[in-house]
Amino acid sequence: MTNVRIGVMYDRDWAPEGLPGFARQAEALGVDDLWVVEDLGWNGGVSAAAVALGATERIRVGIGIAPAPLRSPALLAMELATLARVFPGRLVAGVGHGGQDWMAQVGAVARSPLALLEETITSVRALLRGERVELAGREVRLDGVELTHPPAEVPPVVAGVVRPRSLELSGRVADGTVIAEGHGPHDLENARALIGKGGAASDHTLTVFAFACVGDDADEVTQALRPHVEGHAAWLGRPPHEVFTVSGPAAKAAEQIRELAAAGADTVALRIAGPDPLRQLKAVLQAVAQHD
């Protein structure tokens, strides 16, 4: 499992002012990635990524995920290029459809979510490569736009998607795919097949978010995870016991990370529930290191 990256999510419910300290401590523990969230009403993804990058020296920071309906592709590319130039090689930009209920709240429901996501990712990637973009698409229009300061090291743009047609789209146009919490090894195998059907290159990456609670008290672990598991079960349309988690004693959690890696995950980012998330993160990282 030495090739799998292990990341941690800064949960959207945690106060923004805690992010710099958390990021520094997570980096000191040896984590590979820190992922920040952009959900309507919570934190801004680009600003949170800037805070995390500025507080650390080594770890990669992922934006998971920017809703395409809320983000002008030109402005998003400008923001990403700024971060990528200041912190080369340390940024991953996730883009997705956005929750349709949330998009309706702000009057940003796309006529064609698939077209919008494809045109957004395609144009953002081209702009980051320093290209002059002309696009008269179904949802996006760019008339000779280019970046004055494109990044020397272009950050990967990955698609945060769930449904089959969107997974195929990710394989076709993105550098990688982000899989939402609750998906287990079998789900990853199906996702890989759909991404491949879309024409993914051999270096197309798969990042998996996973609810996590590391501890020896089974009742405490179950209690901490219950609201997350039940909420995602309803969203995914599956019973709660089929919502995959990285949970239990540290050795068991490490084994579950290995299962995701064996199913094709390049990065496993833990969304930790329960008390003292940094203690939990340290325990699972130690368990992984002991096995390797």
Image: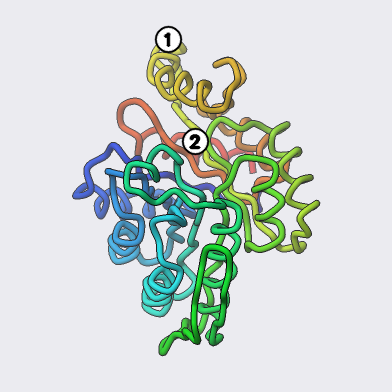
Q: Residues within 10 Å of mark 2 (few under 14, many from 20)?
A: many
Q: Is residue 148 above or below residue 211?
A: below
Q: Earlier in the sequence, mark 1 or mark 2?
A: 1
Expressed as whole percent of the image width and height from the top left, the position of residue 214 reads 45, 27
For label 2, the residue is 284
Q: Secondary structure at mark 1?
A: helix
Q: Residues within 10 Å of mark 1 (few under 14, many from 20)?
A: few
Residue 69 placement: quadrant: bottom left
Whole-angstrom CA distance, mark 1 to mark 2, is 19 Å
Of marks 1 and 2, the one in the foreground: 1
Residue 42 placement: quadrant: top left
Whether residue 1 is visible to the viewer of this picture, yes or no, is no
Residue lying furthest left: 17
Expressed as whole percent of the image width and height from the top left, the position of residue 146 reads 47, 86
Expressed as whole percent of the image width and height from the top left, the position of residue 86 reads 36, 77
Q: Secondary structure at mark 2?
A: helix
Q: Is residue 83 above or below residue 177?
A: below
Expressed as whole percent of the image width and height from the top left, the position of residue 58 reads 42, 65
Tell me the number on the disc at residue 219: 1
Instruction: Name which residue lies at 63% across and 63% down.
Output: 175
- Say what amino acid the circle numbered 2 marks: Val
Assign the N terminus to one quadrant of the image: top right
- Say what amino acid the circle numbered 1 marks: Asp
